[in-house]
């Protein structure tokens, strides 16, 4: 079981891990050892995640979210399978923790009178500069 917060914990059946060969340098070792991990979390079917958290998680996950609602996290940072597994699990936990935070609602505000005046003054100055670029009358 993977504990995320005090209220959210992920059961082992919701996670599947697959070990694959990592890309990149590593000499002969890279061809023999499957040290990279691909962690799959059945997020859509998870009974432990509330619906709002699932929606935020889907938005945060982006391309890592599959069509059938599975979250895939890959890790091939180290040459140690166990370490990569721990990193992938920690990334998943961090992503879910972010999804549990409710975003603050934006309160629309009006621009101040001073900011309006500064904006119009800057526009006028810019217009004057552009007006001076025209053809000069009387010179040949």
Image (tube, rainbow, N blue to C red):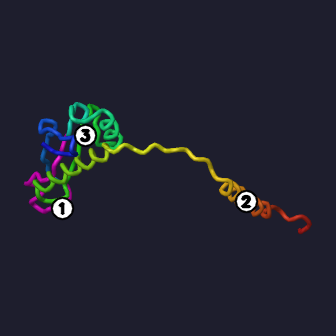
Residue 130 x/y as whole percent:
75, 61
In primary-sequence order, the first of circles 2 and 1 is 1
Q: Are marks 1 and 3 in contact (CB under 8 Å)?
A: no
Residue appearing at x 23%, y 42% in the figure? 72
Would you place residue 62 above or below residue 111 in this image? above
On-image quarter of the C terminus = bottom right
Residue span colored magenta: 23-40
Q: Which residue is labeled 2 in the image?
A: 121
Q: Residues within 10 Å of mark 3 (few under 14, many from 20)?
A: many
Residue at numbered disc 3: 71
Spatial CA span between label 2 and label 3: 51 Å
Q: Earlier in the sequence, mark 2 or mark 3?
A: 3
Image quarter of residue 101: top left
Q: Secondary structure at mark 2?
A: helix
Classify residue 121 as left or right of residue 41. right
Q: Residue at x 14, y 48 (%)?
A: 20
Looking at this view, name the residue that lies furthest to the bottom. 139
Q: Residue at x 21, y 40 (%)?
A: 8
Of discs 1 and 3, which sits in the foreground?
3
Q: Residues within 10 Å of mark 1 (few under 14, many from 20)?
A: few
Residue beneath the point at 69% across and 59% down:
118
**Is 7 displayed left or right of 99 in the figure?**
left
Nearest the viewer among 19 and 54 is 54
Magenta-drawn stretch contains 110: no
Q: Label 1 vs label 3: CA separation?
A: 27 Å
Give the structural element (helix, strand or loop) at label 1: loop
Indicate yes or no whether the magenta region holds residue 38. yes
- Residue 82 badge: none
Q: Earlier in the sequence, mark 1 or mark 3?
A: 1
For label 1, the residue is: 25
The part of the image, by quadrant, that contains residue 48 is: top left
Instruction: Answer with the quarter of the image where residue 1 lies.
Output: top left
């Amino acid at each position: 079981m993977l504990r995320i917060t005090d209220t959210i914990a992920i059961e082992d059946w919701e996670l599947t891990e697959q070990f694959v060969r990592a890309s990149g340098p590593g000499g002969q070792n890279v061809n023999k050892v499957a040290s990279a991990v691909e962690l799959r979390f059945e997020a859509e079917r998870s009974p432990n995640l509330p619906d709002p958290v699932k929606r935020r998680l889907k938005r945060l996950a982006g391309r890592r979210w599959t069509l059938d609602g599975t979250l895939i996290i890959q890790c091939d940072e180290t040459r140690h399978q166990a370490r990569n597994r721990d990193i992938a699990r920690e990334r998943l936990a961090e992503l879910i923790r972010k999804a549990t935070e409710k975003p603050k609602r934006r309160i629309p505000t009006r621009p101040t009178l001073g900011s309006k005046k500064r904006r119009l003054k800057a526009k006028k100055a810019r217009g004057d500069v552009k007006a001076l670029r025209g053809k000069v009358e009387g010179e040949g």
